[in-house]
Image (cartoon, rainbow, N blue to C red):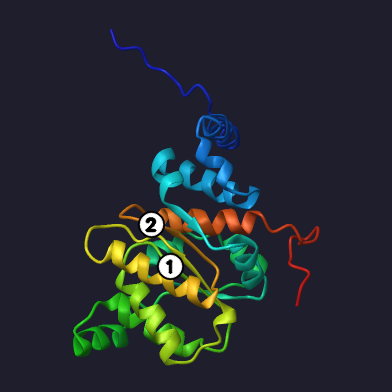
Amino acid sequence: MFIQEEPPINIGADISVRSFEIISDELKKYPKIEDFDSNEIEVISRLIHTSTCFEEVLNNIYFTPNAVPKIQELLKRRAKIIVDVNMIKVGISKFYLDTYGNEVICYINEPFTYKYAKKNRTTRSYGAVVEAIKRHRDEPMILACGNAPTFIYSAVNTLLNEKVNLKNVAFILFPVGFVNVVEAKDYGKRFCEYYNIPAILMEGRFGSSTMTVATLHATYKLIKDYDGDKKYNGK
């Protein structure tokens, strides 16, 4: 006989709280967690929450020094968030975007992107980020990638070619796959280390657009300086 059941925990907020309690308890079993500061652990917990993968996250996550607070500063300065796919764009919380005045830029489906890719025999992701950086070169920007590794090559090369002020730039890099992925992440990592650019990235093949969104949400959540109306107090 089959007996119908209901979820043991049935309230969304309660499910979220219990999930993070479980993650916190299980993280204590991994000595690797001691390598990270409290901000980084918040990001790691979010990444585990969205993937359920403890070892993959802990063994492959990489932060440049003080990456989280530096990315927060760019967000508070109304940074444009330039992304490789619309999946990231629709996944980012409207509350956070409205609170800090951030706009998500994704030109992947624009006609000029198709033309660029065809003319230059490259991916649309490569062409989309070229145009995004050119159009917003004088504004703070966070380059967030969860799918297309060619986005990383294009971002690095366009930033250099356009002589963008790299003090206004940060990277969140989580492309996933088999072709160009490891090499692209290594290229982005070396670029960020050389030019002292804040970055959070997932080394190896592992990653996803949902993990990119989770990283941004964790970073937003750690920002404390907004008032009772939940509007940022800075300029």
Dividing the image into 4 quarters, which one contains the C terminus? bottom right
Nearer-N-terminus badge (1/2): 1
Identify the disc placed on residue 215.
none
Quarter of the figure with residue 221: bottom right
Amino acid under label 1?
Lys
Identify the residue under disc 1: 189
Horizontal side of 128 relative to 216 (left or right) equals left
Q: Position of residue 86 (x, y in %)?
A: 38, 67
Q: Secondary structure at mark 2?
A: loop
Amino acid type of the residue tagged 2 in the rendering: Glu
Which residue carries the number 2 mark?
Answer: 203
Find residue 143 and report its horizontal and vertical position in percent: 47, 72
Q: Nearer the viewer, residue 33 or 164?
A: 33
Q: Residues within 10 Å of mark 1 (few under 14, many from 20)?
A: many
Q: Is residue 140 visible?
A: no
Task: Please state which of residues 97 and 38 is positioned toward the viewer in this rendering.
Answer: 38
Query: Depth check: 21 or 170 in front?
Result: 170
Residues at marks 1 and 2 touching, judged by CB atoms closer than 8 Å: yes
**Above-or-below relation of 143 to 177:** below
**Local SS, label 1:** helix
Quarter of the figure that contains the N terminus: top left
Tell me where residue 28 appears, x and y as whole percent.
Answer: 56, 31
Mark 2 packing: few (<14 Cα in 10 Å), some, or many (20+)? many
Can you tell which quarter of the image residue 111 is in? Answer: bottom left
Residue at coordinates 74% horizontally, 60% vertically from top-left? 230
The answer to whether residue 63 shows anywhere in this view is yes
Work out which residue is located at the far right of the displayed protein and give it: 228
Q: Is residue 84 left or right of residue 223?
A: left
Q: Is residue 206 above or below residue 225?
A: above
